[in-house]
Amino acid sequence: MAGGMNWRTPAVILAAGTVVLILAFGTRTSFGIFMVPISEDLGWGRQAFGFSMAVQNLIWGVSQPFAGAIADRWGPGRVVAACGAMYALGVLIMAGAATPFGMTVGAGIVVGMALSGTGFPVILAVIGRSVPEEKRSLYLGLGAAGGSSGQVLMVPLAHGLLGAMDWTAALLLLAAMAAVMVPLAAALAGNPDKGAGVSPAVQKQSIGEAIHEAGGHRGYWLLNAGFFVCGFHVAFVATHLPAFITDAGLAAGYGTAALTLVGLGNIIGSWLSGVLGGRYSKRYLLSFLYFARAAVFFVFIMTPVTPASVVIFSFSLGLLWLSTVPLTSGLVAQIFGPRYMATLFGIVFFSHQVGSFLGAWLGGYFYDLTGTYEVVWWLSVALGVFSGLVHWPIDERPVARLSAASAE
């Protein structure tokens, strides 16, 4: 049995997990450029499509702690395989949707549940457990950066598909690609109690004890509050930026280019945050990232929308986009240990997805109400400042249980 597990080396786990993240995250990110063609073809307002994306984020968040707990209890392989198949099904339902309700079922409910087993919390937990503590931040950064490349790959691909065929056929092809996640799950299977990063002190703890321990830690709740803001920013921009750019009079291709540039900057930012997180205080790095986001939003909304401003904004925001993920997940593992990382980071991710629900939905709501995204842009600035402040006082030292074990 042990010999059969030898092929699942950290490098293999990192590679397989990265491809799953590329397909899951990249496909989801590409949904934003379907908003205009679907809404125009079916006669919907933007709020209808925005609502389905908002539901997706909320269902993803609600499902995430349960998917993480199942993966931590019975192994991540089954979770990734089942959710990969569900992802493909959800995109198929999107392709056949004729009403806002059908789109909400496919894109919102089914894809939302599928993302809980194919997104960052479950995949990064597998990667984090596969390596010792001194390499964990780097590997988490590599996984996040690799997964972030999905935005660079899948958004232009979806744009090309929409140029060559109607949106229904394009979604059918994306569904076929999503199904590739199912066989990749084999490389991510294994016993969560085993791994180079799992210490005996963590193995003795039950999942209930882990949740209780985290719930009594002030810094854990501050992480929840801060990651809410990350979700709001990401969902609002990913869902509404292409439409905002075309509203400003630029060609639709600039919307695709913007999301692609965000993804390109994201690769660099995620990798860099993983490297820096292994050397410097993660809480201070997170504070800097959120303050910087607020500044980038402020400058963008105070300047005219031009091709140059879109390029500068998109790449700058990309550097700060999901660079929060290896730092936030790394803090969870650093403070509480990696054994129940999928569960504990999954709960933090639920907060992220509540923010995502509001970011995607309020963008469409205020646009339909006022004809502009201005209210949500300013709200994004304020939330960036708030998140920068709440990360500053987090106590990032390992809990007493881990400190005592390392002293033995």
Image (tube, rainbow, N blue to C red):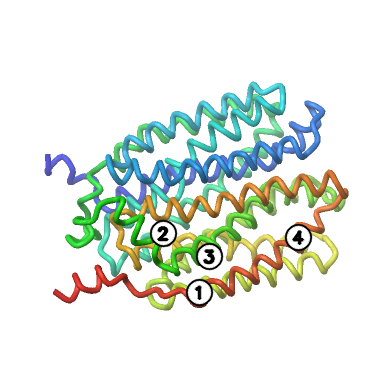
Residue type at mark 4 is: Trp
Of marks 4 and 3, which one's residue comes earlier in the chain?
3
Residue 407 in the image: x percent, y percent?
17, 76
Tell us which disc is closer to us: 2 or 4: 4
Question: Which residue carries the number 2 mark?
Answer: 142
Report which quarter residue 320 is drawn in: bottom right
**Whether residue 109 is situated above or below residue 276 in the rendered picture:** above
Of marks 2 and 1, which one's residue comes earlier in the chain?
2
- Marks 3 and 2, how far apart at CA: 10 Å
Residue type at mark 1 is: Leu
- Marks 4 and 1, how far apart at CA: 23 Å
**Whether residue 401 is situated above or below residue 162 in the rendered picture:** below
Residue 186 in the image: x percent, y percent?
30, 37
- Residue 102 relative to residue 344: left or right: right
**Whether residue 381 is situated above or below residue 145 in the rendered picture:** below
- Marks 2 and 4, how far apart at CA: 30 Å
Q: Which mark is residue 377?
A: 4
Of marks 4 and 1, which one's residue comes earlier in the chain?
1
At horizontal 35% and vertical 32% (from top left) the residue drawn is: 183
- Marks 2 and 1, how far apart at CA: 17 Å
Residue type at mark 3 is: Gly
Report which quarter residue 173 is drawn in: top right
Instruction: Say whether marks 2 and 1 touch (CB < 8 Å).
Output: no
Report which quarter residue 160 is drawn in: top right
Element on which disc 3 rests: helix
Tell us which disc is closer to us: 1 or 3: 1
Question: Which residue carries the number 3 mark?
Answer: 269
- Marks 1 and 3, how far apart at CA: 12 Å
- How packed is label 1: few (under 14 Cα within 10 Å), some, or many (20 or more)? some
Question: Which residue carries the number 1 mark?
Answer: 285
